[in-house]
């Protein structure tokens, strides 16, 4: 597995030399590309350098131990050797994690789509609570949220809610949230005190740029119309709302949150590109799943991933069989323990696949 590390080290040294070349600095596009590659390789190079230094320490300690006669000195060398051997095991594991192929989408922003599922008005209330949970999580990460579309049910719930989350490596953490979220509790409308089970579906799509997805405009029908519902002075008075229909896939996008038709059109195309990119990612995941052992799901919106049981104060993450009894904190956006556990399980599965290759 470590065979290619020397080649990576050579490539890193080449990049550093190129970055000091004035001709490269003057070519900003090439310079930025090299800076990105250097930034991606740096953690791996630093860890590999630490690995080589620690291996050298082990070899030196063994050699000195063999030649040493002084008992006190021997004890010191044995301690140094024991510490180095302990460190090398830890460093090897860290190197393996760094060698896992990076998801090219990890650095992207995401578009989140939450839809009410089974359970009528209660599921719409759940969809609104999930939006609140993700909003608070985004705040804790200093990510920015931008509402793209929302359909309310009149009692504070969301039939559907689409929003963008922008920030540092958003997709790398949010991608694990795709799937069916199940809630068990007594609804406010339930007079008999019975526990109901309701669901909401979450889809996480990486924000697609024009370079990621090419849309043939001949495949898209654009309709403009007057926006509906509460809003600013342009609502119901101008044709500011936009509906896109992508004929090859049947995807329909409706955007009316902005005052101008141009802004709504831009938002609609951003969402369409992300939905088309999601289709490509799902195809890739399906192909990989056919070749590899199961990894933690990060894309199938029909997979039941999590249960929030309010009477017990319990949250169960079904993919990794993790149960936490602090539901209040989780609903207030404290998702790091769940997401960190999912990332660890995903990395372990990918490592197992790497070691088999």
Image (cartoon, rainbow, N blue to C red):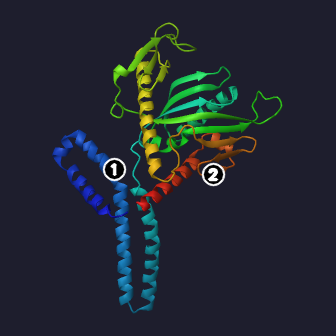
Residue at the spot x=45%, y=35% of the render? Answer: 278
Q: Which residue is mark 2?
A: 322
Characterize the local packing of mark 2: few (<14), some (14-19) or many (20 or more) Cα atoms within 10 angstroms: some
Q: Which residue is mark 1?
A: 39
Characterize the local packing of mark 1: few (<14), some (14-19) or many (20 or more) Cα atoms within 10 angstroms: few
Q: Earlier in the sequence, mark 1 or mark 2?
A: 1
Q: Nearer the viewer, mark 1 or mark 2?
A: 2
Residue at the spot x=65%, y=34% of the render? Answer: 199
Dot 2: what SS?
Answer: strand
Q: Residue furthest right?
A: 192
Left or right: 344 in relation to 118? left
Q: How many marks?
A: 2
| 83 up-or-down from 183: above or below | below
Q: Which mark is residue 244?
A: none
The image shows residue 269 at horizontal and vertical percentages of 41, 24
Residue at the spot x=83%, y=31% of the render? Answer: 192
Dot 1: what SS?
Answer: helix
Q: Residue furthest left?
A: 23
Determine which quarter of the picture holds residue 210. Answer: top left
Q: Which residue is more in the foreground, 323 or 179?
A: 179
The image shows residue 243 at horizontal and vertical percentages of 46, 17
Left or right: 138 in relation to 95? right
For the residues marked 1 and 2, what is the alpha-carbon distance in whole angstroms?
A: 34 Å
Q: Which residue is more in the foreground, 45 or 4?
A: 4
The image shows residue 260 at horizontal and vertical percentages of 43, 15
Q: Quadrant of the N terminus?
A: bottom left
Q: Quadrant of the C terminus?
A: bottom left
- Circles 1 and 2, Cβ within 8 Å, touching? The answer is no
Q: Residue furthest top?
A: 237
The image shows residue 284 at horizontal and vertical percentages of 42, 42
Q: Which residue is more in the foreground, 58 or 189?
A: 189
Q: Residue furthest bottom?
A: 69
């Amino acid at each position: 597995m470590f065979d290619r590390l020397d080649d990576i080290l050579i490539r890193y040294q080449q990049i550093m030399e190129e970055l000091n070349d004035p001709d490269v600095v003057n070519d900003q596009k090439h310079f930025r590309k090299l800076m990105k590659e250097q930034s991606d390789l740096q953690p791996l190079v630093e860890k590999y350098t630490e690995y080589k230094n620690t291996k050298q320490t082990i070899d030196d300690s063994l050699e000195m131990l063999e030649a040493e006669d002084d008992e006190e000195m021997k004890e010191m060398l044995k301690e140094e050797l024991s510490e180095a051997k302990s460190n090398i095991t830890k460093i090897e594991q860290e190197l393996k994690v760094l060698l896992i192929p990076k998801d090219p989408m990890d650095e992207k922003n995401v578009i989140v789509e939450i839809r009410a599922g089974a359970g009528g008005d209660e599921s719409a209330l759940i969809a609104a609570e999930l939006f609140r949970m993700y909003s608070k999580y985004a705040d804790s990460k200093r990510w920015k949220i931008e509402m793209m579309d929302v359909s309310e049910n009149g009692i504070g719930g969301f039939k559907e809610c689409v929003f963008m989350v922008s920030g540092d490596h958003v997709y790398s953490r949010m991608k694990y949230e795709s799937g069916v979220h199940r809630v068990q509790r007594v609804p406010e409308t339930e007079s008999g005190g019975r526990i109901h089970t309701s669901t909401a579906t979450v889809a996480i799509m990486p924000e697609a740029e024009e370079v990621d997805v090419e849309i043939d405009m001949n495949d898209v029908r654009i309709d403009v119309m007057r926006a509906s519902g509460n809003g600013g002075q342009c609502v119901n008075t101008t044709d500011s709302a936009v509906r896109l229909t992508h004929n090859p896939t049947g995807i329909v996008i409706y955007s009316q949150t902005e005052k101008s038709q141009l802004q709504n059109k831009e938002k609609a195309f951003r969402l369409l590109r992300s939905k088309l990119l999601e289709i490509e990612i799902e195809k890739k995941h399906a192909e990989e799943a056919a070749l590899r052992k199961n990894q933690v799901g990060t894309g199938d919106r029909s997979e039941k991933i999590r249960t929030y049981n309010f009477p017990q104060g319990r949250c169960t993450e079904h993919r990794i069989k993790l149960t936490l009894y602090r539901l209040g904190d989780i609903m207030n956006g404290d998702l790091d323990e769940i997401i960190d556990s999912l990332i660890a399980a995903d990395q372990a599965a990918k490592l197992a696949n790497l070691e088999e290759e």
